[in-house]
Amino acid sequence: MSSGWSGNYHMNYTSTPIAGVKRPRNDSGNKVTVVLGAQWGDEGKGKVVDLLATESDIVCRCQGGNNAGHTVVVDGKEYDFHLLPSGIINPKTISFIGNGVVIHLPGLFQEGDKNEKKGKGCLKGWDKRLVISDRAHIVFDFHQAVDGLLEAQRQEQEGTNIGTTKKGIGPTYSSKVSRTGLRICDLLADFKDFSVRFKNLAHQYQSMFPTLEIDMETELRRLKEYAERIRPMVQDGVYFMYEAIHGPPKKILVEGANAALLDIDFGTYPFVTSSNCTVGGVCTGLGVPPVNVGDVYGVVKAYTTRVGIGAFPTEQLNAVGELLQTRGHEVGVTTGRKRRCGWLDLVILRYAHMLNGFTALALTKLDILDVLDEIKVGVAYKLNGKRIPYFPANMEVLQKVVVEYETLPGWKSDTTAARKWEDLPPKAQNYIRFVENHVGVPIKWVGVGKSRESMIQMF
Ligand code: GDP
Ligand code: IMO
Ligand code: MG
């Protein structure tokens, strides 16, 4: 059956609902499995996605852009993904970039081409395995320049900035919300119309920032070339996902970018990113009904890190923080900035669970704690000497909380060769059970190294 689509890119859908034919409520189709960051990002989502992607048919990104930096290590080779779903590394999976993602086209191709040159060619033909939603918004070079200008303005006016990745994420989502943004479908339609709207948007930004230089003709020429390169990849994302869910059985995986505490609504605002990195972003960023969301896996680093500015109650500005930073190689994949480090914070994990309804957790980087005599875990926040039963919305309040810690004994032995639960020292097992009990979510995987193999599956 044809979808009746009359756009200028071709597709054929078989599962489009037929008017008047109602599906029974319980015939909800395939479920999507979701992987989300439970802290401030860089928890090891790339590695968890890679593990699950080996058995997935489709791997999707639903939000964010190339502010994300996800690392996958296969056969000793390290690949970094920013905009491409990490599942692209698996030649059997289709990767999908949904409508909720903001796409910088030069960045997309640089990333694909760079990774294609690495390893044993598992990224060969990556562009043939990629589907892009026609509703996704485009990040222009001037959005990235404006990101930098806004940061400088914040610094000057407020004495602090956000510490963004300067990938144009905030300005592009601002264009989207103010309804002046341009989408992939606009780029592939009438290029004259597109050029007019592009110039109008560019002029708007130039009136806000008189120093902003934009070489419109050069950027438009490049965009025209990119349009032809992506045309074969672009589909109506809503119908693509509907087909994936209601067609033959398929394993569909969603790779969250950024993390719960960076969520535009629920994170440590204003020191957040500009998209919903919690589970709601899966529905709005892909066009997936909530009934089709299946397992939601939260990825948790065995301690806490944060890149950029903002409150961080369990941060350790001391030898412990330095040790975690050095042993954990805590340097941002996207910006190369040192990550701030501190103890695990169960208050934020419980908060992230309230928002996402995790069905299980992946606890990564346990091996980084191997050398510690004792390990602290933040279990509650106090304000004016009293425990508070919530995670504060206001940043000034969050800056003031005093963290209540529990101290657990370190195991002081190398866990990197552990491949099953019994291989872990009892004190490490105790740490894992402590986290599980205090968050109230089972831990399904424990990471003890960078590679695919160094992930202990618990059940
Ligand atoms: P993401 O943004 O959540 O995908 O995480 P990043 O890739 O930005 O950062 C996680 C870093 O930790 C990467 O360098 C991973 O290779 C590494 N990593 C992931 N899991 C483990 C683990 O269990 N142990 C160790 N030592 N490194 C890990
Ligand atoms: P992954 O997917 C860590 C942070 C930035 C900054 C704030 C806003 O690798 O976990 P933005 O450029 O999004 O406007 O920056 O959000 N940030 C991340 N920190 N990991 C990420 O992604 C991040 N994505 C954004 O450092 O503080
Ligand atoms: Mg990262």
Image: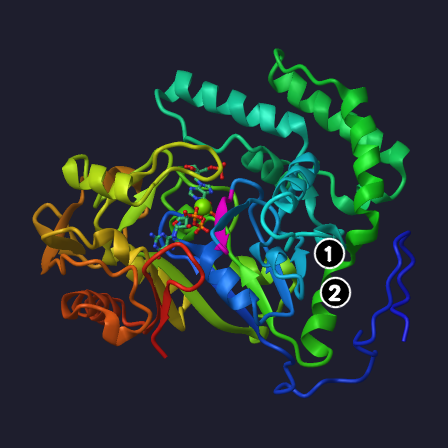
Does residue 322 appear left or right of residue 67 in this picture?
A: left
Crowding at label 1, few (<14), some or many (≥20) Cα neighbours within 10 Å? many
Mark 2 within 8 Å of ligand 2, using the beta carbon: no
Does residue 287 appear left or right of residue 55 in this picture?
A: right
Label 2 is placed on what type of residue? Phe
Residue at coordinates 49% horizontally, 37% vertically from top-left? 334
Label 1 is placed on what type of residue? Val
Marks 2 and 1, the one that precedes in the sequence: 1
Q: Which residues are magenta?
A: 68-75
The picture quadrant where one finds residue 390 is: bottom left
Tag 2 secondary structure: helix
The picture quadrant where one finds residue 31 is: bottom right
Q: Residue 390, can we see it? A: no
Does residue 439 appear left or right of residue 82 in this picture?
A: left
Disc 2: which residue? 240
Disc 1: which residue? 131
Image marks 2 and 1: residues in contact by CB distance under 8 Å: yes
Q: Residue 91, can we see it? A: yes
Q: Position of residue 296 (x, y in %)?
A: 46, 69
Q: Position of residue 124 (x, y in %)?
A: 70, 52
Vertical order, 455 against 198 (above or below): below
Task: Provide the major secondary structure of the magenta segment.
Answer: strand
Does residue 412 appear left or right of residue 191 in this picture?
A: left
Residue at coordinates 82% horizontally, 40% vertically from top-left? 227
Vertical order, 200 against 189 (above or below): above
